[in-house]
Image (cartoon, rainbow, N blue to C red):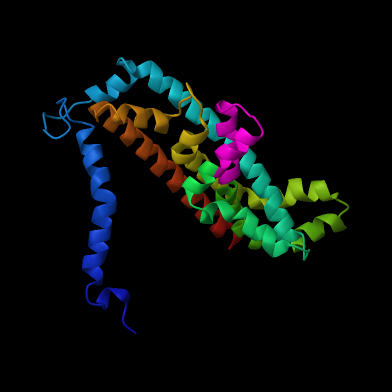
Amino acid sequence: MKGVRHYPGFLAMAVACLAILYVPLIVVMVYSFNDSTSITTWGGFSWRWYADVFTGPEAPRFKAAAWNSITIAVLAASAATTIAVAASLAMIRGGRFRGKSATFALINLPLMVPEIVTAVATLIFFSTIALTTGYMTILIAHVVFCIPFAYLPIAARLQGIEDSYEQAARDLYATQWQAFRLVLLPLMLPGVVSGFLLAFIISLDDFIITNFVKGAGMETLPTAIFGSVKQGIKPNIMAISTMMLAVSILFVTLSYYVNRIGQRTRS
């Protein structure tokens, strides 16, 4: 059987798709080191725009936005991971129960619904219950849409763990909580860490939902970048974007390798 690379046009299509996806990112990264104030003319290599992010006139705004983004991401990822652990235990260790398929679909619904629809629906919900938009509304929204991202690696890890470990612990007079805390949770840990990292980076990078529910005067790093871009693209925005891209790549890579370590341990 022929591999996909032997099909006519496959290589050209793959190269075109990769170019469309990654060339703009590479351009942004390269010009973030441009010494010139122009975003199209190369003026030599320089770190000046990275320094400007921390010491320039817009530095206080970006620092406040970054603090909001990081704290919301940590809290949202922690809450979403806790809920995802409970959901995976119910779905995989809970046996058969009425509405199991519907529950699984509900957990994964944020992955299938367009983000703009989720954003509008969330804003309408907060308006209906008269909840003032701000830090708390962003946090609640992030927890909800981060749950499936945390759930998938945790559930995948749990499916590969035989229930005989828990049964052995119960036979040795461990309580259900002790069997979970001392036996099952350590075995699940690579999936839990992977789910947390994935939920963290999804929350940190979110713009659409955050922009709808943030309220006046509240900024996260993506919305602060968008607000600056509306006034014109400046090299310091490219520097911030490059740093966010580096953080995203780091966390996704960590999530991948934590999962790989878990799979090797299980094997």
- Residue 161 in the image, given as x and y percentages of width and height: 67, 61
The residue closer to the viewer here, 111 or 22, is: 111
The residue closer to the viewer here, 83 or 229, is: 229
Q: Residue at x 28, y 21 (%)?
A: 51
- Residue 121 in the image, given as x and y percentages of width and height: 56, 44
Which quadrant of the figure contains the C terminus? bottom right
Which residue range is magenta in the image?
A: 121-145
The residue closer to the viewer here, 47 or 115, is: 115
Q: Main secondary structure of the magenta part?
A: helix
- Residue 251 in the image, given as x and y percentages of width and height: 45, 42
The residue closer to the viewer here, 211 or 182, is: 211
Q: Is residue 61 left or right of residue 110?
A: left
Q: Residue at x 21, y 67 (%)?
A: 12
Answer above or below: position of 256 versus 159: above
Q: Residue furthest bottom?
A: 1
Q: Residue at x 48, y 30 (%)?
A: 69
Is 110 magenta? The answer is no
Answer above or below: position of 47 versus 124: above
Which quadrant of the figure contains the N terminus? bottom left
Residue 157 occupies quadrant: bottom right
Answer above or below: position of 17 versus 82: below
Q: Is residue 168 left or right of residue 247?
A: right
Residue 221 occupies quadrant: top left
Q: Residue furthest right?
A: 173
Residue 162 in view, yes or no: no
- Residue 153 in the image, given as x and y percentages of width and height: 57, 54
